[in-house]
Amino acid sequence: MALKKATPSAGGPKGSGSGASGGRGWTSTTGKRPSTGDVARGTVLTAGAILVLVPIVWAVLSSLKSPEELAQRPPTLYPHEPTLNNYTEALTAFDFPLYFLNSAIVTIVATLLTLAVNSMAAYALAKYNFRGRDTLFVITLATIMIPLQVIFLPVYQVVASLGLVNSLWGMIIPAAATPTGVFLLRQYMLSLPDELIEAARIDGAGEWRIFARIILPLCRPALAVVAIFSVIWRWNDFLWPLIVAQDESVYTLPVALARFSGQLVVPFHLVLAMSVLSIVPVVIIFLLLQRQIIAGVAQTGLK
Amino acid sequence: MRGHTLLRTGAIATFSAAVLALTACAPGGSDDDPTPGGGAEPGSETIDWEGFEGETLDYVYFTDGPDEAATRDLIGQFEEETGAAVNLQIIPFAELEQTLQARINSGNPPEVARVAQWYPFADSLVDVRTYLGEDYPEEFIAPQAAAGTDPEGRFLAVPNDLTMNGPFVNVDAFEAAGVELPTADDPWTWDQLVEDATAVQEANDMESAIAIDKSGHRVSTVLSQFGTTLLDDDGAALDPEMASAALTELNDLVGSGAILRDFWLEAGSRYAGAHEQFLAEQVPVYLSGNWQVGQFAENASFGWSAVPNACAERCGGFPGGKFLTAFSGSENPELAVAFVDWMNRTEQQVAMAEAAYWIPTRADLAEAEINYPDRVEDMAAFRADVEVTPEDAFAANAHPAFGAAATLVVEEVSAMFAGQQDPAATVEAIENGVAEAAELVQP
Amino acid sequence: MSNRQASTAGAAPASSPRRAAPKQRPRWRSVKWAPYLFVLPNMALFGAFTIYPALNAFNLSLYSSSDGRRFTYVGTGNYSQILSSEEFWSVARATVIFVVATVVLTTVAATALAIALNAQRRGKGLLRAAYFVPFLVSPVVVGLIWRLALERQNGLVNTVLDAIGLGQPGWLLEPRLTLGVIVLVGLWIQLGFYTLIISAGLQGIDSSVYEAATMDGATWWQQLRSITLPLLLPTMLVVIVLSTIHAFQAFDYIYTLSGGGPLGATTLIVQYIYETSFQSPIQFGLAAAATVILFLVVFSATLINYMAGRRREAV
């Protein structure tokens, strides 16, 4: 992402109207009335958004249907007799608060760890010139390409030999060094001006301080993207937490939810209800972080 | 500058050394040469029932619903009696294999696991005869005891419950159509089954006539009724003519719409149960098995019942079952065997059967009456079919290659239903595939 | 880290020509060591939890094993078995088609959407959030929802299509159609995320450039072609590289959606490896060999992508 110095669009076209964060329209319209182009675009975007949301909305509505109604063929569009039974059944069937807490702990700690470790590595790969830098970068890229499903047996052996099985740390640590995060952050950091760093060095700042006080704050948009990615992935992660966990006390939400899936019976109504419940926290986090990305860039600039 | 060159050379050297070292030696963690069963003599050890106070046992389990509560009850009783603590670790069935493999490979297997297939772990299991005596297998019905025994005679997996495949019918629909149900004395022939099912379907305007789970066990049921099985004690055993008759029957049913083709193709290689169609009252006859009884008792809003299997060349269904296994590498194998023994005693098997609509595997319960809370006649129909099911069906299910064979059969039959190959070619493909699979498991 | 080294290196000489630095230390030492220290935690984790197991897997590919505990050396036997297996090649073909289609569609759609959203004045945040919601759902559940929706006779989609007279296509029954379906569902899942990345890149383009172009009389299409797209190229490269890699790894939602069917038409490489490892007959060595092949292919693809981008001085 080759970022140039961003200037707030104060003198720009009157595009930045209602509450939308700093929109810079680059059409040549400067009038106040929306043009047909704008209306068309708005309509298309909204229609697209509705289409995209239809399956989700249907899933939420279906979670309010009783198992009999869910089994109906052809399926009903909306629940004729909406019921919250699925939710109560799922919530009382197991220790929901415990699993929610475990999921929350794993997600938050893992995301913080990921952000810390990835940003440090990205900084080194982007802003330093050292022997082995390119090799390390290539290795970083290479490690994305090995999906967990195919190496989890040896990974489990490593984790077991470190004594991390059956613990939340065993879920948090192994995958914290996400190559995707390093890649994204490095890309972003490449575009930060080197002069910033040089100037800071001349002023006598230590390397760590340059990183922590100057570079990191500038990376807020990229950090937000990596954070969103990590939060969603960790919150929904199923296979690894399942394998690492043995006792129910360390189950996360998706793992606990999957307990209902026996050999021959998948209680779809419970799955739906719990899935809907799991989406809510992530949506909230996304809405919070979304502003970071958009607002963050407007604040960059050489001091 | 020196620091860098050193670091780089060092890194490269270490990396190459690691690669070389790893490729030079065989992969895998444990040094011990795993002997199945631990290599001890039957009856050479005894269980010290007083000595379990304060010890823990990990029990890896998967649940189909009603059995969980019953299991927890029994566990509570075990804990009281022995003073040991049992960790019930419930995982989804689909991940059972991976979880156990991971834990065994890294040296921390659970004490006990409930499994459907035990051959993949054979080398890590305890021969329970070591603690429970050479005659222990005789406490269970012969075919299932044989299913838990390896070729050397070690009793590595104790049969915990027996499943039997068989048909369910929508009684209300049959009544509405004026068609009579088969009875144990007057079971269906295949032709009668098709005729009746089609009549009821049309009278009630249902989607199709017969629903059948997408599973190798179900296809094996049909194969068995037409006179043949995939495997027997000596290996591949498919009779091409009989198999061809069976598959042609199924193919014709799909072709005429009596069986939904979509259902078989849309699920890819995943298992799919056709119970949804039955519960939605869109099909009058559903070929499944006794584990559905509990589910239907809860969720079906119409009158239904289990009926005897249809007969072609022969009658009966096809068995399945779960086993309890004790792991030799676990922290407490003695406690593990004690638990396995205890859970399979008469009283306990009766308790589980009554709560979860299971069929017990103990020889002394084979004829006994079980007080199922409900649906007694349906369970009776399944248990009656256990008597009628031919021996080679049990042998097929017990064969180590059955899992691979079942997957293969589903693949080939799906291709047949899709019109990619005719029944004769399908039979040939199955024959070859099963022969290969059988060879792979001969050590 | 480097500050500690700095303070032990000695006090600042009194006659420093620069402004009095609070800590003066041999600059060469701290700057030169810093990158290694920054990179260390990440690489240590990589090394232990990804590289070492991967090497293990590579090693395993030279053996045959059905339980992960007993091994028989077979050298290149596994490789020749895979490379001569028809099933593998049909899986490889399906995977490549899937990856190319996904990457192209994702990049184009995300770019278009990001540009459109950027130009939108009202409700940007809400729209962006709407497109992002699918990404929040667990992939397994995504597969379940779409499987129900796309059933030929009883799915929601066909019920609607039938009502408006368009018939009932077999979305999950025709091999090519199913492949299309999994590409589109994959797009549905990821679009919001990649749009976010490109949006972040868009924000960095100076609006004064546009103003100047507008004053010179350039239409929006010309501006798009000559200003926006070229400046977006590095970001688009990121999207291409990431979506390629993630496409090669696609498994969860596909497995619950189509099960790899019909008849293996949508069985991609990760499912192939997974089934070889955990469905009878279990063959860990074979699966490991397939993993090595997957790795080599993806690695080359990524390198090529990256070099091509580099040549354009995009990075």
Image: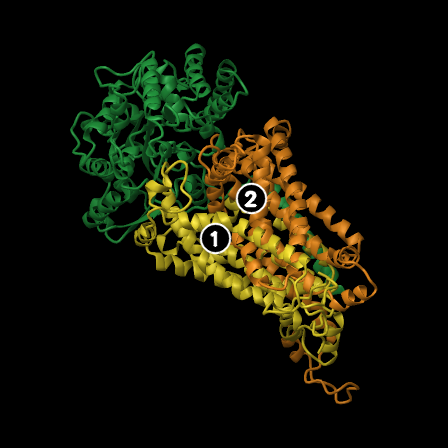
* The one of B268 and B220 positioned closer to us in this rendering: B268
Hey, what amino acid is under mark 2? Val
User: What hue does chain C carry in this figure?
Assistant: orange
Quadrant location of the C terminus of chain A? Answer: bottom right
User: What hue does chain A carry in this figure?
Assistant: yellow
**Disc on res. A236:** 1
User: What hue does chain B carry in this figure?
Assistant: green
Mark 2 or 1: the one toward you:
2
Figure check: C1 above or below A53: below
Chain letter of disc 1 in the image: A
Chain letter of disc 2 in the image: C
**Disc on res. C185:** 2
Are the residues under badges 2 and 1 in a single subunit?
no
Q: Position of residue B196 (x, y in %)?
A: 31, 18
Q: Position of residue C184 (x, y in %)?
A: 58, 43
Q: Residue at x 50, y 47 (%)?
A: C139
Q: Position of residue B382 (x, y in %)?
A: 25, 25
Q: Secondary structure at mark 1?
A: helix
